[in-house]
Image (tube, grey):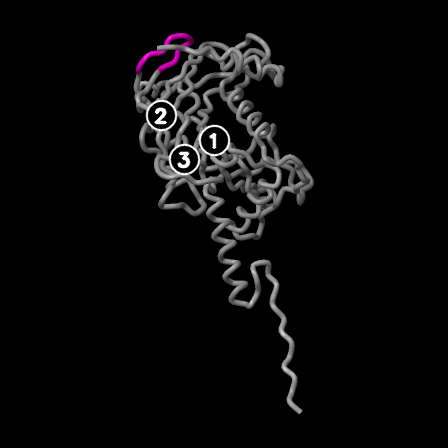
Amino acid sequence: FSILAPRLLKQTVGCFAPQFNNTIQHDSQEFCQYLMDGLHEDLNRVKSKPYVEQMEANGMDDGRAAMESWRKHLLRHDSIFVDYTQGMHRSHLTCPSCGRESIKFDIYSSISLPIVPAKNRSSIPLKDCLDQFAAGEQLDSHNAWYCSSCKKHVCALKLITLWNTPDVLVLHLKRFTFEKCPTVDGRLIRRKIDETVDFPIDRLDMSPYTLGPTDPDAPPIYKLFGVSEHTGSTANSGHYTATVRNTEDGNWYRYNDSHVGTSSGEAAVTGGAYLLFYQRAKGSLRWAGMEKEMIAERSKNDSSNMAAGEDTDGFREVTGKKKKKR
């Protein structure tokens, strides 16, 4: 097999991001996220970004809140990455002291999943990680939320629910955790979780985790096309490899520096799997389906206006009164 070393790409990214302008090994998730964000900005069709206030969705219908949040997002962000790699989730924060709630719809381009303990099993089903993600968490003091009612930062209860999923879905397995050092007070050490997460190759069904409407012509069912793998004790040391499905012949290949060989999707299911790249198996939805939702809403509004004697802009035709015959 012929190979291509992406040195020029690495050097180019380093020109814009000094943290990558060295020979140190970096976290592949951080590099991937920076690269996607940077390419999005370079390809952004919005050249003059207006100021947009973040919207609170308390008391609003979820569908309406999601639509308005996405409209606000498009005022500043519009690229091929927005079209096919970004989705939206519903964030729900609750103050444990006074019960005040905050509901917002936020944009995501990857999903970070906690790895739950194996509990005497040889591997952890990806479903367990998704279930733990959907179960919510209580924020710690380092990520406390400011409650405007209590006038202080609190360890709020946080629940993240996916509203929709994009055509390209990136799952990040949170293998690296911070723990208190047993020998040095106040020092945190980074530990790696090496347990194997058993993820599906040809059919990942995200329907149980999606709150918004789904399209039968393009359901949230995915097939794997790539895995970024890590061996070593920390994200900044060790070694990275990749297992990728070729879109032309459908075969799997393993990339290990300058060594390339045939492989399989099942061979990537190891304790080193770090980033999982999925693609919608059937159909395609721009803006994770929000484009269809917005077109349907516009058509509905146009029909309502026409029924009320209004044009598509909401103006009603005014006719003069008939004059009485003398």
Kindly identify the residue that appears in the image at 65 percent across and 37 percent down: 146
Sooner in the amino-acid sequence: mark 1 or mark 2: 1
Res. 119 in view: no
Residue 261 is inside the magenta segment:
yes
Q: Decide whether the magenta segment is chiefly helix, strand or loop.
A: strand
- Callout in the foreground (1, 3): 1
The reply, left or right, for residue 326 in relation to residue 64 is right
Res. 234 in view: yes
Could you tell me which secondary element the residue under label 1 belongs to?
strand
Q: Which region of the structure is painted magenta?
A: 254-262
- Callout in the foreground (1, 2): 2
- Does residue 66 lie above or below 236 as drawn? below
Residue type, label 1: Ile
The reply, left or right, for residue 117 in relation to residue 90 is left
Residue denoted by label 1? 111
- Callout in the foreground (3, 2): 2
Query: Is there a contact, CB below 8 Å, between mark 1 and mark 2?
Result: no
Sooner in the amino-acid sequence: mark 3 or mark 2: 3
Residue type, label 2: Thr
Residue denoted by label 2? 247
Residue type, label 3: Asp
Q: Quadrant of residue 219?
A: top left
